[in-house]
Image (spheres, rainbow, N blue to C red):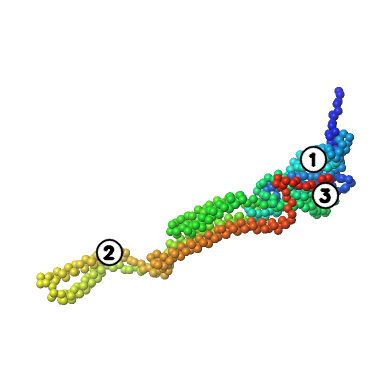
Amino acid sequence: MTTYAKKYNAVESTRNRIVKLYQDRVLTRPSVKNVTRTAVAIGLGIIEVAGLDPQKQVITLNVNFELKWCDDLLQWNTSEQACVKRNRSEILFTANEIWTPDVLAVNGPGQLSKGLKLQYPISVVCTGNVRWSYQEKLVAFCEIDVRNFPFDRQYCSILLQSTIYDSSQFKIRSLYNVLRLYNYITTEWEISHATIKEIDLYNAYYRSNFSTLQIDIELVRFSRFYILKIIVPFFIISTLAVFSFCLPIDSGEKIALTVSVLLSLVFYIQLISGYVPKTERGVCTLTLYSNGIFFIVFLSCIFNTFTIFIYYHEPYSRQPKKVRKRKKSIVFNVHKSLIELNKQRWKFLRKRKNIEENLPEQTDVDAIELLHDIRYFRQSLMNLFIRRNSLITTTSLDYQHPIFNPKSETKRSVKRIAMMIDRILFIIYLMLMPLSTLLLFHSAHQSRLASLTKTNSTNQLVDLRKSSIDPILLFRGCPT
């Protein structure tokens, strides 16, 4: 049986040699030209702001890491594969075959998927320059303040640091002098400002300083959606409550309008609660605005009810006791009528003496007297019948506060007072509604002024899609 050896080309031979050399040194920190400290340059490109969680106080970013370092064990210059300056050869390795730096965000909960970046190849040049580019989901703690929601600005810091090596063994440098927006995907947040600093942070556990790359970013929330979807409709619906004071008091539609507006605002408050960040670290401006407008509309319903009460209701005044008159008998009424009849007859008899002389001779004076008695008696009986059918007992009402008497002039003045209250409330609400909305937008101005004081340094943010000039590499050779 003949065994044929596998014939490798120059690249495969060099690669196999380096992998065998690295089998026992994968965890050994590389060195360059007898320099004990390993320098790694990091270039960070942000692809997307995946989200901010106000409850957990974390920010999640989809980023592109670009790492660069040098390793003497990854150099080659053979006759089969010469390392020429103009045409330097390149070999790809995996992260499991050679040493890779352990850099992560120390101010975060940790990496979500550590094995994902190990699938990206590592490019090595014959001079020992190593370049590794991969995408990763970066999670870091961020103090999120939502009091100015939806016009808020958040300020987050990302601290990239080695988990093992301190400053005497490991140095982190910035590969670019800017923070790149690498094919940035526009979401709810926009990155408006960024700075990069190389600092040393003291680690109390290891009792030494660790080289750290600090990246400070400012994020601005896009508020156009919230303005058009929530604030503008909420303001229009709540403004309808103002015109309830313009309706006539006796129309009966004042309370119906304000109650309808209240029910509509309840629906919108439920909608707002789904968008407002759920946190106990502060009440956002939009929540205060919606609750304040709802309370104002509720007060308008109360004021309309009070105005209608004044317009229609009679007061509960202290009334005198009812005095029941004793029923008068028919005999008493007839007796009183007969007495009155006799009085009339005596008056007539006095006049008779004066007019008898002037009457004609054939005139019957007794017949005239009888006719007069019959007419008077008939009128008395008619009055008795009317009084009998009417209320026997009457109540003497003496209002101490006659302002609510609809038949009086004071009652009409109270109606004018009710209408005047309506006009005053209309003017007050007409000024109060726009003022509350202006206060809401004033928070956006305050947030913008606060950002000017916090971001007074040079902006090191570059959007690669908008910039025609590529960012400059700070280290073309080995980082130091």
The spot of residue 192 in percent (x, y) is 69, 51
Residue assigned mark 2? 386
Looking at the rendered image, the disc whose residue lies closer to the viewer, 2 or 1, is: 1
Kind of residue at disc 3: Lys
Residue drawn 86% across and 23% down? Answer: 1
- Answer above or below: position of 380 versus 214: below
Residue assigned mark 3? 171
Residue drawn 34% across and 66% down? Answer: 394
Q: Is residue 266 left or right of residue 405?
A: right
Crowding at mark 3 (Cα within 10 Å: few <14, some 14-19, many 20+): many
- Answer above or below: position of 250 versus 179: below
Residue drawn 26% across and 64% down? Answer: 385
* Residue placed furthest toward the front: 468
The answer to whether any part of residue 401 appears in the image is yes
Mark 3–mark 1 Cα distance, whole angstroms, equals 20 Å
Kind of residue at disc 1: Ile
Task: Find numbered disc 2 in the image and state the secondary structure of the residue it sits on.
Answer: helix
Residue assigned mark 1? 122
The spot of residue 417 in percent (x, y) is 46, 65
**Along the polypeptide, which appears first: circle 3 or circle 1?**
1
Kind of residue at disc 2: Ile
**Along the polypeptide, which appears first: circle 3 or circle 2?**
3
Near-viewer residue (218 or 88): 88
Q: Is residue 398 left or right of residue 57?
A: left
Task: Find numbered disc 1 in the image and state the secondary structure of the residue it sits on.
Answer: strand
Instruction: Check contact, mark 3 vs mark 1: CB within 8 A.
Output: no
Near-viewer residue (105 or 67): 67
Looking at the rendered image, the disc whose residue lies closer to the viewer, 3 or 2, is: 3
Q: Is residue 176 left or right of residue 20?
A: left
